[in-house]
Image (cartoon, grey):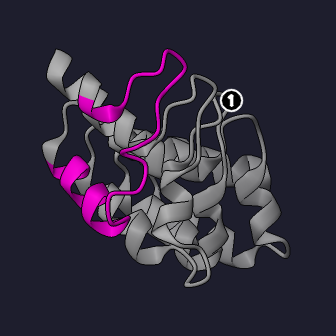
Amino acid sequence: MSAKLWEAFENGNLSLFEKLLNECANKGQVLQSGPNPIPCQAAAKGLAEFLRVALDTDPWSCTLLDSCDRSPLMLSALNGHANVVALVLEKKPPSCSAKALLHQLDIHKMNALHLAVLGGCDAAVELLLAAGDGAGAEMGEQGGLLPLHLACSK
C-alpha cells in the first residue's frame, strides 16, 4: 500500500492518493515512512492539496521531520509557499501550539522563521510572526544569527 501511495503522490494523482490513504489501516505510519515523509515533501514542493489530505488524516503529521530535521512548516517557509505555511498553522492539532512549531530547529539550528527569511518570503515571515506572537525571533542559529540578522544581510 505504501508504494502505491508514494506512486500516486509522485505522479500528482490527488484523488488516488486520497483514496489509498483512506484505505490504509495505519495512516500515520504510512505518512511517516522514509527519511523524507510525504507531508514534508508536499510542503517543500508547495503541494497544498496533498498536504491538506495528509493533515486531515493525521494532524500530527505537521510535526514530522525530513532528513535535515525540517518540518512541513519549515520546508514551506524555506521554499516560499506562504499558502502552505498558513495551511500547516490552520490544520495543526489544537494541543500543538504555533510557538512549539516555531521553536523546532533543523540540523543547522534554524527555525521556520530563519528559513522564511532565507527563502525571501515576506508573506511567510508575517504569518509566522503573527501566529507565534513573535516566537522564534529571539533564537539564534548555529552561528548565533537571529532571523533579523539574516533579514538585514539580504
Query: In the image, what residue occupies the spot 64% across and 63% down?
Result: 61
How many numbered marks are there? Answer: 1
Badge 1 marks a residue whose secondary structure is loop
Residue 1 lies in quadrant: bottom right
The answer to whether residue 8 shows anywhere in this view is: no
Say above or below: 150 vs 114: above
Q: Is residue 6 above or below residue 117?
A: below
Q: Position of residue 69 (x, y in %)?
A: 65, 35
Q: Residue at x 54, y 70 (%)?
A: 55
Q: Is residue 149 left or right of residue 101?
A: left
Quick one: label 1, few (<14), some, or many (20+) residues within 10 Å? Answer: few
Question: Which of 112 and 48 lies nearest the eye of the viewer?
Answer: 112
| Quarter of the image where one finds residue 90 | bottom left
* Image position, residue 99 (x, y; %): 48, 63
Q: Which residue is mark 1?
A: 67
Report the span colored magenta: 123-148
Residue displayed at 70% across by 57% down: 31
User: Which residue is painted at 14% across and 43% down in the image?
Assistant: 122
- Quarter of the image for the C terminus: give it: top left
